[in-house]
Amino acid sequence: MSKKSAHFETNVIHEGYDSKDMLGSLATPLFQTSTFTFDTAEQGEARFAGEEAGYMYSRLGNPTVKVLEERIAALENGERGLAFASGMAAVSAVLIALTKANDHILCSTGLYGCTFGLLTLMEDKYNITHDFSAMGTKDEVRSLIKPETACIYVETPINPTMKLIDLEMVAEVAKEFGIPVVVDNTFASPYLQRPIELGCDIVIHSATKYIGGHGDVVAGLVVGKQDFLDSVAMTTQKDVGGIMSPFDAWLLLRGLKTLPVRLDRHCDNAEIIVDKLRSHPKVENVYYPSDKANPDHVICSKQMKRGGGMISFELKGTKADAQQMLNHLSFLKIAVSLGDAETLIQHPATMTHAVVPKESREEMGITDQLIRLSVGLESWEDIWEDLAQALNKL
Ligand SMILES: *Cc1c(COP(=O)(O)O)cnc(C)c1O
């Protein structure tokens, strides 16, 4: 396709690739190569000098990876995309690029466990401090911005508590101070939420999750302004080196084509499971973004197309009950990660958020009885039957 469509469902299949450029190949070819040959020494010189467009070495760019980068940029409505070896390679490349020693980062309360680990490392090594905020109002956000604040870093929906942050509101405050807003959009995917359209600056994905969707790739993506991502590509990507392999880009292009279809089904199933969980006597609380009982559902309807495929719920009971419930499941899989065809269930306090100290965990609302569910694409009847029999045994 030569012109970007107005429709996400078309761009997710066509953007960034024209089969005419590739001998008519319908599927994007896999350029599984480390390096690229030059016709002459002078051509090599011109490429390295940036005077001639073309590939040199796959850490500096690869044609298969580039198709994915262009596609994700189109889907998030940003200027440029960049692909990384993992979500954390993407998070670290962005945060290292945005900060210097003694800076400060303002974060949403509740972050992916390893992002929390990275912030701790940056504080220990470079005195880059951080604060957490629920970001409920403009004044709450303003009150925590310091002269040395380099960026605002937000996850919404927040993992695993499904609290939401109003991205448009945060972006407005950030503009007052001239600082960028970085959004980890992994839980929503660009099909459900597009932070750049809401005024945010940089979007990060763990493409391992909904973008890949099939549980076979670990990868990360970033979308943002051309200038910023050009500089990341030439510094914290090129020199730190967490680049995506061409084969992973190929798998992601394959998975991505069905993102809207998959996500509609994830959402359909999740909405039903939320209702069922809520009426189960062993369940104390259910957390789901678009659920009317969630105080943040107003924000959800403002910025998300639907509630997504992630649910958390709290049992009436203890850590032992939460672990017992997982052990009683018959076909649902006990695993971290999310966004796969298979329903995945995990215990945040001892798995994804085990590295977070208990007090911080409790501040984030991650109790020992909290269970996180990534609702898969199986029949909802089978998903519920397995959950219900495990709950009934408690
Ligand atoms: C998984 C995840 C990450 C890290 O991504 P990897 O691909 O595992 O490195 C970051 N943020 C969120 C919200 C995630 O779910």
Image: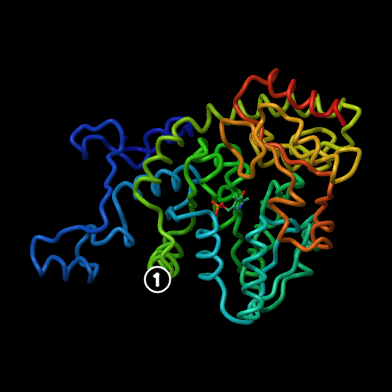
As rendered, which of 279 and 216 lies closer to the eye? 216
Decide if ligand 1 comes within 8 Å of the CB at mark 1.
Answer: no
Q: Residue furthest left?
A: 40
Return the x and y of residue 26 as percentages of the image width and height: 28, 30
**Secondary structure found at label 1:** loop
In the picture, measured across the screen, residue 178 lies left or right of residue 253, that is right
Return the x and y of residue 379 as percentages of the image width and height: 64, 19
For the image shown, how many numbered marks are present on the structure? 1
Instruction: Report which residue position mark 1 lands on.
Output: 239
In the picture, measured across the screen, residue 357 lies left or right of residue 196, that is right
Vertical comparison of 204 with 45: above or below: above
Return the x and y of residue 366 as percentages of the image width and height: 80, 51
Q: Residues within 10 Å of mark 1 (few under 14, many from 20)?
A: few
As rendered, which of 124 and 90 lies closer to the eye? 124
The image quadrant that residue 3 belongs to is top left
The image quadrant that residue 152 belongs to is bottom right
Which image quarter holds the C terminus? Answer: top right
| Amino acid bearing label 1 | Asp
Return the x and y of residue 301 as percentages of the image width and height: 71, 37
Q: Residue at x 67, y 30 (%)?
A: 332
The image quadrant that residue 128 belongs to is bottom right
